[in-house]
Image (spheres, grey):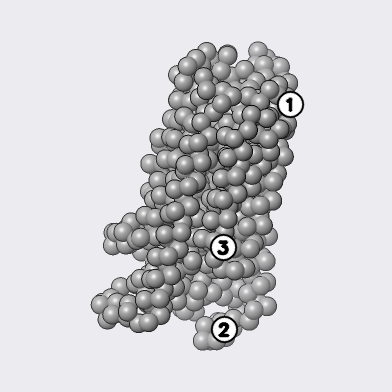
Amino acid sequence: MDPNDEKFAGAEEVDLKDIAAAGVADIDPAVEKRIIRKLDLHILPWIFILWLLAFIDRSNIGNAKLDGLTKDLHLTGNKYNIALTVFYILYVLIDIPSNWLLKHVGGGHYLPMIAIAWGIVGTCMGAVKSYGGLIACRMLLGACEGGMFGGIILYLSMFYKRHDLMFRLGIFYCGAPLSGAFGGLLATGLAQISFHGYDGWPWIFFVEGAITIVVAMVAFFFLPHTPAQARFLTPEEQWQAAHLLKVDLHGATTAEHVEEEHFSWSYVRHALLNVNTIAMSMNFFLILVPIYSFSLFLPSIISGLGYKKVHAQLLTVPPNILAFLTVIAASFASDKIRMRGPLIVTGLLIAAIGYIMQLASQEPGVKYAGTFFVAAGAFPCSPLVLAWLSNNLAPHYIKATGLGFQVAIGNCGAFVATFTYLSPNAPKYRHAINLGAIGLSLILTLSNMAYIRWENGARKSGKRDYRLSAAAGEDLGYRHPEFMYTT
């Protein structure tokens, strides 16, 4: 560590020699706990609310549909489903370059900036008067939101160790199911507004978009870029936080701080050719098919069971509350046992029960009960598979590329989901598509777990030690023989 480093400017009261010497020994667990608690208090609330608003602003079109959007804009045939689909065209294309850009701009500014952008677009959706206007707004909304999901995962991995990460991902991701509950309640009230020629559904977009803009503008001034730039940490704690991350990577990088890592096309190649990147990206695709179907069409599914507009909106709340609780529980348990795959398998089996209930029964009560199983089982799988890949990639630019690729491929599942529930098929929707995706995901998860056990065994037995002599000074990243994959 360079005592003249600008990150420690003005830290006259801190003995920098003592800080440097701390790198030789393990950092006191009490100090580490204090650092993590500070990170949690200053970062997680902002990340949680930004993701909550992101999911509300992309899925509130489902609430607007119940309140007359399709009638007022003359969305006949499959026009509504097309409006859902176009959101993901630019959304999936922007993920990888957005993750590269995040480090250069600084995550603490970059994430709020794109939130402000989509908040503006979301607000404008309330003023659309035609199908063409809706399509344009949905495409712009996708372009603005495209960097948020993968960006948050990458951002959090710059602050937390690999097996402290899952619970934090769970905290932020539970904003997705909570958005369904909160969005349903909010939409119920906003749809009653009639003012200045705008009646009902436009106010869902006006108000929710405006909330996003205000919150993002405040977050811009509070989120740090990296541990070394976190003003709520002392200079000593800044160094210790960065050092904890380096030690956690077991030789995957020689850089003490993420700022010291530089882009290389070889990192891109290693990220995209990793077996975990390919398998977990396909797995994310399969997992998102039922999740997006649930998020976008739950109001329509419940309405198809015979419940009317306001009643249907309110009935979307309980399944989403359950999903919120199971995401938290699964995330906490996953970090405790330091495993991801077994909990994904459990979630998939629970979600499968829910879709079997949808297919096997004609009773509205049974079908509605099935939505609880789907919510409780499917939603935890998404942050789990994302944390799984994040744990198994290093250093920064390999992780940035791999996560961007995973989010891009995974969100292509939306193209399937948006055409899973077509109005002509109501109320007998094609739940079998989602059940099939869950079955394929289960097979892929079990296969990936078997590969990881085999590869970790090879590393423990010394079969990958030859990479050390062949590295020629290059950071091996996840290929380092001492870097063990998370199961």
455 horizontally vs 197: left or right: left
Name the spot of residue 151 as percent of width and height, x first.
49, 51
Question: Against 437, is 245 above or below?
Answer: below
SS at mark 3?
helix
Name the spot of residue 159 as percent of width and height, x first.
55, 64
Residue 165 figure quarter = bottom right
Closer mark to the observer between disc 3 and disc 1: 1
Q: CA distance from mark 3 to mark 2?
A: 20 Å
Residue 185 figure quarter = top right
Q: In the rendered picture of this protein, how many numbered marks are placed on residues? A: 3
Amino acid type of the residue that numbered disc 2 sits on in the rendered structure: Asp
Name the spot of residue 465 as percent of width and height, x first.
32, 80
Residue 26, labelled with which disc? Answer: 2
User: Residue placed at 35% from the left, 60% from the top?
Assistant: 275
Q: CA distance from mark 2 to mark 1?
A: 57 Å
User: Residue placed at 64% from the left, 39% from the top?
Assistant: 370
Amino acid type of the residue that numbered disc 3 sits on in the rendered structure: Leu
- Let me know if residue 76 appears in the view: yes
Q: CA distance from mark 3 to mark 1?
A: 38 Å
Mark 2 and mark 1 lie on one chain; the one further toward the N terminus is: 2
Q: From this viewpoint, which residue is outermost toward the front?
A: 360
188 horizontally vs 227: left or right: right
